Amino acid sequence: MSRQSNTSIPTATTCPYCGVGCGVLARAEGVEGDRQHPANQGRLCVKGSALHETLVPAGERGFSPKVDGRDVSWAEAIDRVASAINGAVREHGPGSVALYLSGQLLTEDYYVANKLAKGFIGTPHVDTNSRLCMSSAVAAHKRAFGEDCVPGCYEDLELADLLVLAGSNAAWAHPVLYQRMKAAQRDGRKVVVIDPRETATSELGDLHLKLRPGTDTLLFNGLLVWLHDRKALDASYLKQHCTGLENALKAARQSAPDTRAVARGCDLTVADVETFYRWFAETGRTVTAFSQGINQSIAGTDKGNAIINCHLATGRVGKPGASPFSLTGQPNAMGGREVGGLANTLAAHMEYDTPGARQLMAEFWQTDQLAGGPGLKAVDLFEAVHRGDIKVLWVMGTNPAVSLPDNARVREALARCDTVIVSDCVSATDTTAFADILLPAAGWGEKDGTVTNSERRISRQRRFLPLPAGVKPDWQIISEVGQALGYVQAFDYRKPADIFREHATLSGYRNDGARVFNIAALAQLSDVDYEQMNPVQWPVTSGETGHVQQTPRLFSEGGFPTPGGRARLVPVSTQAAGQQPGQRYPLVVNSGRIRDQWHTMTRTGLASKLFAHRDEPFIDVHPADITDAGLVEGGLAMLTGPSGQFVGRVRSTSNQRRGEVFVPIHWNGQFASSALASELIAPTVDPISGQPESKHGIAAIKPLTAEWQARLLLPKHQTVLPTPMNASFDYWSRQVLPNSTGWWLAGRHRADWTELGWQCFGREPDLLMEDGASGRYRAVWLNEDQLEAVLMVESEAGAMPGVEWLDQCFAETGQELEHRWSLLAAGSADIEPAGALVCSCFQVGENAILRAIEEGCHSVEALSNTLKCGSNCGSCLPEVQALLASAPAQEGQQTGLSA
Ligand code: SF4
């Protein structure tokens, strides 16, 4: 295996998207799954498979820093950053400087950023977008175990005889891990899915508890009571290794005295609740995997502890196939936690109030300027920016202008801040628009360092592309700023390996076993060892033979990092309540990921194949709510919440509970006119973790009644609408197509298309079809024999033809005369519309699958053999299964999955 890619030898690295942390073999021209990597064993999901298509192209990134929009040298940019920090510290104190980091950063970047801010600038205000993702799980771990430790490993999800998936749509959010769970299905193994929505993950469930949102604590409190009352607790484990059972039980019993109370509160049947409780009691090998549906809540920490309580009480912690398991959202959320990337932590899993920690850190870093106490967590931090308390804000590798709740206020805060510094590999994001100083940072493929996935596994992310001239990796940018601030020795790093060794040394520094996070056995790695380092799960110790030993599981025999060595069952109440729906805002809004996009689309938005699954922002609505609100399936609707709006295409689905809608988190201001899910989310946070309640907003919905709907196709390089169009519509969204850029447009008022065409293209269309009575208008502009623009207007979206064939025409020169009139029909008789894309790997659309079912493919296997759908990453298998289930039953039909 090579460390440097050329066209034939791949480089072993890791995927930069989700917390599964898959190993990838990468070449400049393509990627494949790494069979040697323990996390994925060769599998990749559709996002991972498209990684080479999401490398940021030259036109969408900068190659020199900018100050106030002006290209400057790196020397000048570093000097400006240092001057801004120095000035703010001098005039307003160190607390006037803040860093907002990202789970996309590598551990080495994170370490240096944390060291600079907390150790040398002296500001505690260092937080990260991981706050939005798993900080409630972190807080729950600390309360229960004494330290932020995930006790189990991925293998446990396969070994479990009962797998409980709480608040996790793993099929879409952690696809490869989901495929591992699915492949582990066997006789006698059961899966319980706990989610208010039916999702792609629900198909794995033997039991789906479609509970009322926010009632997870009640469900697990009821489980603790039920287990206790039926003498199903592990008395021996509790006695030897735990404290707090009585108080936890007392609190649980107050809200969940019996199954009836739980069923009523959770809006479930008594029978379903009892089935879950009975299975849990009967199955020693039980894993409860929990994710954003638990964490992103005003009571996320309590929910996490309600789950962990049940596992502690049954002794199911860190044993093969038996553990609570937090699924992390981002590729390096855990690496960030290791180095202290959260505002309430110091470094190396030490808190500010850990006895002796501040002194230890000051000594290790050789500084007398260490921050004095915890800093502001994400939502509070941006509020401080808004107030003007933070004068210098440095954002690295994240897009808070899209992702943070109450988005309008966050944008106001960014606009008000004296100096906004943004380091990013993408030049035009919603956040870089606010940058006074913009620093072009290395992207995936150019970066070099380590990441830690959800099972505590540290892997190398290796560079396989040359670092472009004018671009620097984050650790180097931060180190140069540190040196410009005068801390020459402390930031004298030459390469990521130097930083990793220091980080590993710190983890073991005066660590007498009180801190579980310890990788000191890696502190002596040579540069070559670091380059060749294999994935390893912390804590890492030195074996007798000198070999490093990793730790797949923790705490099966107790030994918790608490003062008494015992884990704590935590009393959790069910009282917490966020915004409640009412007359004005009658709907509950849930937000989350979709299968083929990642975060705010800055990278996955570059790949046409990742748009084919969902090409527009959408709103999932229950059919009865569609009727009540006068909506039309496939029409546009506007959600209005207390602090913002969201416009999307209505999808009718009984997967939603009545009174609840779902919106995707991905679309941003570069891709849609008004589709920021975060605008519907209040900045309400969990009081312990500070994590926002992103799974719960409130809103009213109404149709966006459009006089016309249009599709506009322009050449691929044109990613911005012609300016004259901007004033003419009430909705737009952009889709990247293989050969062109496409927009959906809609307007409430009649538009003068002839005039608009003139303004945009400077002449009449070359081909035109107009029917005033039906509202149809189609126009084509050609540049000699090359397609320049296609505009199709209809009175309703349902009448709009597909654009697959038109898109192909953008790749062709020499538009034949007889073929030109087909452009107005938007199709050739030879091409059948694909319908919504189901299988991204083999580009198989819904229509092809439905036709194959009609023609006799009555199982997933048969469809896979005929069309190849589902035979690669498997991410689409739940949707293939759903199409089979929805098709009219045929004699002998089977829909079972074997993949
Ligand atoms: Fe990347 Fe997909 Fe693996 Fe997540 S599951 S790390 S997105 S390949």
Image (spheres, rainbow, N blue to C red):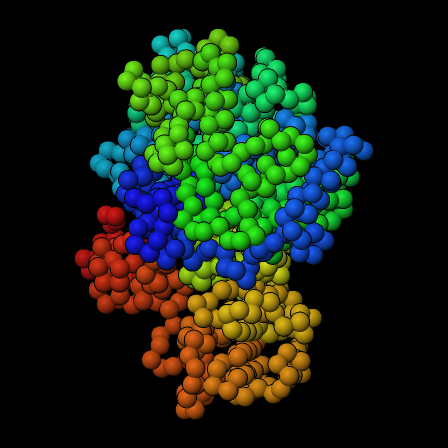
As displayed, is residue 248 above or below residue 461? above
Residue that lies at the very extreme toward the bottom in this rendered image: 817
In this orientation, which residue lies closer to the viewer: 893 or 815? 815
Which quadrant is home to the N terminus? top left
As displayed, is residue 451 above or below residue 821? above
Examine the rendering and report whether any part of residue 568 can be seen: no
Residue 198 is situated, as x and y percent measured from the top left of the image, at 42, 46
Instruction: Please give left or right for residue 114 compared with residue 497 in the image.
Output: right
In this orientation, which residue lies closer to the viewer: 779 or 698? 779
In this orientation, which residue lies closer to the viewer: 404 or 578? 404
Residue 142 is situated, as x and y percent measured from the top left of the image, at 51, 22
As displayed, is residue 129 above or below residue 513? below
Task: Give residue 773's quadrant in the image.
Answer: bottom right
Residue 458 is situated, as x and y percent measured from the top left of the image, at 40, 33
Give the number of callouts: 0
Task: Give residue 669's quadrant in the image.
Answer: bottom right
Examine the rendering and report whether any part of residue 811 can be seen: yes
- Residue at image coords 67%, 32%: 486
- Residue at image coords 77%, 37%: 87
Instruction: Please give left or right for residue 4 compared with residue 605 in the image.
Output: left
